Amino acid sequence: MFGTTSENAAHRIAVEWAEDGERRAGVYVPRRDSDSRLNTLLGGRLFAGEYHRASFDSLSAADRYAVSMHSDDGEVSVSVAGRTTDALPDDSVFGSVEDASRFFREGSLGFSPGRDGFDAIELCAFDWAVTPLDVESVSSSFFEALPAESVAFDDALLMTDIAHEWRERESVCV
């Protein structure tokens, strides 16, 4: 009833580590962008994760989706366009949509640079469901700034109308 909506982008890098003898999975999020003034004002202060202001353009029509984001500080831009499909690309590192979905669900804990270490926030989706996209175009100034052999696009998964919460977790101090 009193919730807010916003468009957000997070550059996510998958990470794995051992904790108490068990393999854990999550993501390192070096940057978050949002069209919400509330997110950029309170992020990193009232809730985990600092946000930069950005503008978003989104299109969804039938089975086609396109999203682009440009940060107000000119540091990053991202765009992706494609159509829904039933399968991942043949050269994906994941064997199936289910494998990719499981990987990202298990990696829903994200760490971002914070004031005193790394802020931790977890995506808790109540009805986790993904749909693969057959990507027609993709670009990310963030990843394109890295050496070409160090990063490669794999796939895109779409989540729409998912009931969820962001839950703050214990920060990691460095």
Image (tube, grey):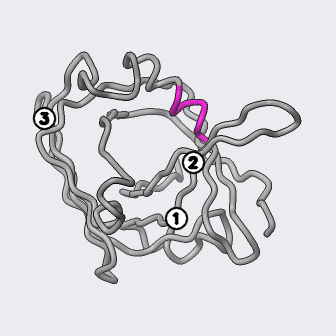
Residue type at the position of mark 2: Val
Residue 16, image x, y percentages: 64, 41
The answer to whether 32 appears left or right of 50 in the picture is left
Residue 98 spot, x, y in % from top left: 44, 16
Mark 1 crowdedness (10 Å alpha carbons): few <14, some 14-19, many ≥20: some
As helix, strand or loop, the secondary structure at mark 1 comes to strand
Q: Which residues are magenta?
A: 103-108
- Res. 27 mark: 2
Single out the residue that lies furthest toward the right.
Answer: 20
Q: Residue at x 22, y 56 (%)?
A: 139
Q: Residue 28: give x, y in percent of width and height.
A: 57, 54
Decide: is 40 above or below 152. Answer: below
In the image, residue 123 sits, relative to residue 7, either above or below, namely above
- Quadrant occupied by the C terminus: bottom right
Q: Verify CB contact (< 8 Å) between mark 2 and mark 3.
A: no
Query: Callout 3: helix, strand or loop?
Result: strand
Instruction: Kindly report which numbered mark, 1 or 3, lies closer to the viewer in this rendering.
Output: 1
Residue picked out by circle 1: 30
In 3D space, how far apart are the residues under numbered discs 1 and 3 (Cα atoms)? 29 Å
Q: Measuring 27% from the left and 26% from the top, which residue is drawn there?
A: 91
Magenta stretch, main secondary structure, is: helix
Residue at (53, 77) in percent of width and height: 41
The amino acid at mark 3 is Arg
Q: Nearer the viewer, residue 74 or 21?
A: 21
- Amino acid carrying label 1: it is Pro
Q: Which numbered mark, 2 or 3, is in the foreground of this view?
A: 2
Residue for badge 3: 64
Callout 2: 10 Å neighbours few (<14), some, many (20+)? many
SS of the residue under disc 2: strand
In the picture, measured across the screen, residue 74 lies left or right of residue 108, that is left
